[in-house]
Each structure stands twice: as C-alpha cells, then as structure tokens.
Image (cartoon, grey):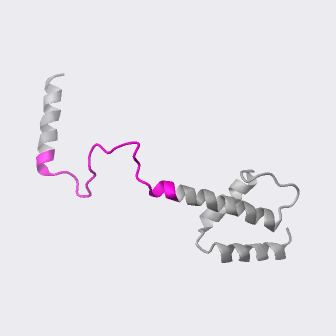
Amino acid sequence: MPVSRQKELSALILTEYPFLKASEILLFFHRLKCGRYGRFYGSVDALTITTSLLQFMDERRKESVRYRQPDTAAPATTTPSSSGITYEEYLRLKEQKQQHHEHE
C-alpha cells in the first residue's frame, strides 16, 4: 500500500475510532496479520482493513460487555474489604489456627 493510502487510511481510522488506544490498534493489526478476520491476497487494501476493523470493534464491544457483567459463576465466599479484617476476626482466625495445630 502506498504511503499516501496509508496516511489516508490512518486518518479514516482516527476519524471513525478516536477512542481506540494505540495498544488496541496494535492488537487489531496483529489479529489481522494472523488471519483472524479472513484471508487476504497480495497487498491489503483499505476496504479489507476497515471491514476487518468492524469485526474487531464487534469483538471489543462483546468483551467490554462481558467484562462489566458480574461474575455469577463463582459466588464470593467472603466480602472483600479495603481495610482488611477486624481485630475480632483476627483473634477468631488465630484461635482456629491454634486449634487446628493442636489436633495434628
């Protein structure tokens, strides 16, 4: 692809997808080169890339929806706390540990 077409394509991508991070664009081109969005023959044209980019964006949307959904497959056994455990919980756990070692 000539440099002028590359610049035109990059301007199109920036206009249509200004929210994409550089790492996401790199991931897209990696997947494109690996054939994830179909085969291409000879040189890759802008239409092939933009069509593949639509597929990538659909994958990205599905992943972000899946990421934002709570994980219902594995229920939490304890509620995580940003401040750790209380002193009473510590004493209870310490006592349980001591009892466990006494029974061994």
Residue plotted at (17% across, 34% down): 97
Give the quadrant of the C terminus: top left
Q: Is residue 83 above or below residue 8?
A: above
Q: How many labels does the image show?
A: 0
Q: Report whether 38 appears left or right of 55.
A: right
What x and y, as percent, mark residue 102? 13, 25
Magenta region: 65-89
What x and y, as percent, mark residue 4? 83, 77
Q: Report whether 22 appears left or right of 50.
A: left
Q: In this view, does 19 lie above or below 64?
A: below
Q: Report whether 55 appears left or right of 91.
A: right
Residue plotted at (26% across, 58% down): 82
Give the quadrant of the N terminus: bottom right
Residue plotted at (17% across, 28% down): 100
Q: Does the magenta stretch include residue 87?
A: yes
What x and y, as percent, mark residue 74? 38, 42
**Residue 52, quarter of the rendered image:** bottom right
What secondary structure prevails in the magenta region?
loop
Q: Does the magenta stretch include residue 31?
A: no
Residue at the right extreme?
Answer: 42
Q: Report whether 85 appears left or right of 68.
A: left
Task: Choose between 50 and 103: the one closer to the eye.
Answer: 50
Residue plotted at (15% across, 45% down): 90
What x and y, as percent, mark residue 29? 70, 60
